[in-house]
């Protein structure tokens, strides 16, 4: 007797949108054209003042549309997660279209690795016209790599099990710039991350993009906060606690890059990074602790010629 066919898991795609009328239709179409059929699309208009409501109206029979007064990206994403009914969740920024086969690959990766709470692909950075700027091939991240390297490019096209919401909750609504990165660190603390070695998502760089203005004291402080709360978490692995000073040195060095024109703060963070590294080096000498090592950083590939991202699949 043949085994019964298991139903496909429902995938909820949450699209937060704020003044992205120029790109929203392209992104919604990229989800609707996916080969994976069992999906729901939730578009949340975060109080846009441009033509976003009109774009959403064009898709009213194919998406669930929600509009509220402006409250910011993380609260908007959280509302979408509350509304989502899927077994698997994917947050897609309104200006970052998915590439063909993304949902199918995300579902397959999570079904293949039952221990992973999330699966993430490689992705391309594109300009406002959709021209490829560079391709990022990501490593297989483990928590130690994410902390010791602190060069984490997880973000576009991540697929998340519903169980992750139950274990780590939603995004921190108080964070302005690092809400997504904070979330992936929390997921990594709770369970594994699965790498999908294929280019399946995009990240668009343009003046209106939220990350374009992510400089200054707020961003720097959020970077430091991320490292400190991770180290202080009860779930933080015991074997990594010995590298506390290495981790704090790395975090202060990274934070120094986000100080904008504040040269005083920049110097202050670099001095703290050097002090923590000095203590870490002495700790290694006194204890015989092996210096930490981590996996490769993302491999960045420049395009051989100017091409639209859709040409990657022709």
Image (tube, rainbow, N blue to C red):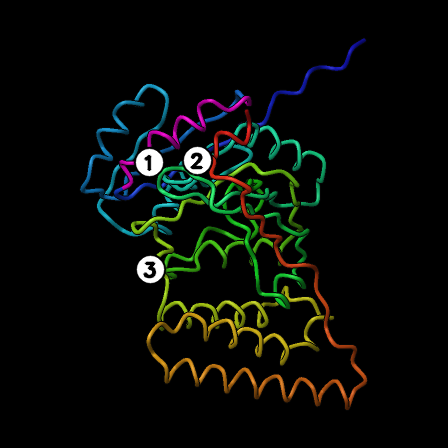
Could you tell me which residue is drawn at 43 percent across and 84 percent down? 267
| Mark number, residue 97 | 2
Which of the marked residues, 1 or 2, is nearer the chain's N terminus?
A: 1
Could you tell me which residue is drawn at 74 percent across and 70 percent down? 239
Q: Which segment is the magenta one? A: 20-36
| Mark number, residue 213 | 3
Quadrant location of the N terminus in the rendered image: top right
Cβ–Cβ below 8 Å for labels 1 and 2?
A: yes
The residue furthest top is: 1
Could you tell me which residue is drawn at 78 percent across and 10 percent down? 2
| Mark number, residue 23 | 1
Cα gap from disc 1 to disc 3, whole angstroms: 19 Å
Q: Main secondary structure of the magenta part?
A: helix
Badge 1: residue crowd in 10 Å (few <14, some 14–19, many ≥20): many
Does residue 199 sit above or below 281 in this rendering?
Answer: above
| Mark number, residue 187 | none
Could you tell me which residue is drawn at 70 percent across and 40 percent down? 114
Is 44 positioned to the left or the right of 157 in the image? left
Q: Check if residue 254 falls in the magenta segment.
A: no
Cα gap from disc 1 to disc 2, whole angstroms: 8 Å
Does residue 180 sit above or below 37 in this rendering?
Answer: below
Q: The residue tagged with tag 2: helix, strand or loop?
A: loop
Cβ–Cβ below 8 Å for labels 1 and 3?
A: no
Looking at the picture, tell me which residue is in the foreground, 223 or 233.
223
Cα gap from disc 3 to disc 2, whole angstroms: 21 Å
Residue 79: x and y in percent read 37, 43
Q: The residue tagged with tag 1: helix, strand or loop?
A: helix
Which of the marked residues, 3 or 2, is nearer the chain's N terminus?
A: 2
């Amino acid at each position: 007797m043949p085994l019964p066919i298991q139903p496909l898991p429902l995938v909820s795609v949450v699209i937060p949108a704020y003044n992205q009328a120029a790109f929203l239709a392209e992104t919604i179409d990229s989800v609707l054209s996916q080969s994976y059929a069992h999906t729901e699309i939730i578009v949340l208009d975060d109080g846009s003042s441009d033509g976003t409501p009109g774009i959403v109206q064009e898709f009213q029979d194919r998406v669930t549309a929600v509009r509220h007064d402006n409250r910011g990206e993380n609260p908007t994403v959280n509302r979408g997660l509350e509304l989502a009914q899927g077994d698997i969740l994917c947050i897609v920024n309104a200006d970052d279209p998915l590439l063909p086969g993304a949902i199918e690959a995300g579902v397959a990766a999570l079904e293949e690795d039952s221990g992973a709470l999330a699966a993430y692909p490689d992705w391309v950075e594109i300009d406002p016209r959709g021209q490829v700027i560079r391709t990022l091939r990501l490593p297989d991240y483990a928590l130690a790599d994410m902390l010791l390297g602190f060069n984490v490019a997880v973000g576009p096209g991540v697929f998340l099990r519903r169980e992750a919401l139950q274990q780590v909750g939603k995004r921190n609504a108080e964070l302005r710039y690092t809400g997504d990165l904070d979330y992936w660190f929390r997921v990594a603390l709770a369970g594994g991350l699965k790498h999908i070695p294929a280019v399946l998502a995009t990240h668009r760089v343009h003046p209106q993009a939220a990350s374009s203005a992510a400089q200054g004291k707020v961003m720097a402080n959020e970077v430091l906060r991320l490292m400190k709360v991770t180290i202080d978490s009860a779930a933080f692995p015991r074997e990594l606690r010995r590298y506390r000073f290495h981790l704090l040195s790395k975090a202060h060095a990274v934070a120094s890059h986000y100080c904008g024109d504040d040269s005083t703060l920049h110097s202050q963070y670099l001095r703290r990074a050097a002090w923590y590294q000095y203590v870490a080096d002495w700790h290694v000498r006194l204890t015989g602790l092996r210096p930490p090592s981590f996996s490769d950083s993302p491999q960045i590939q420049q395009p051989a010629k100017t091409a639209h991202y859709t040409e990657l699949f022709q």
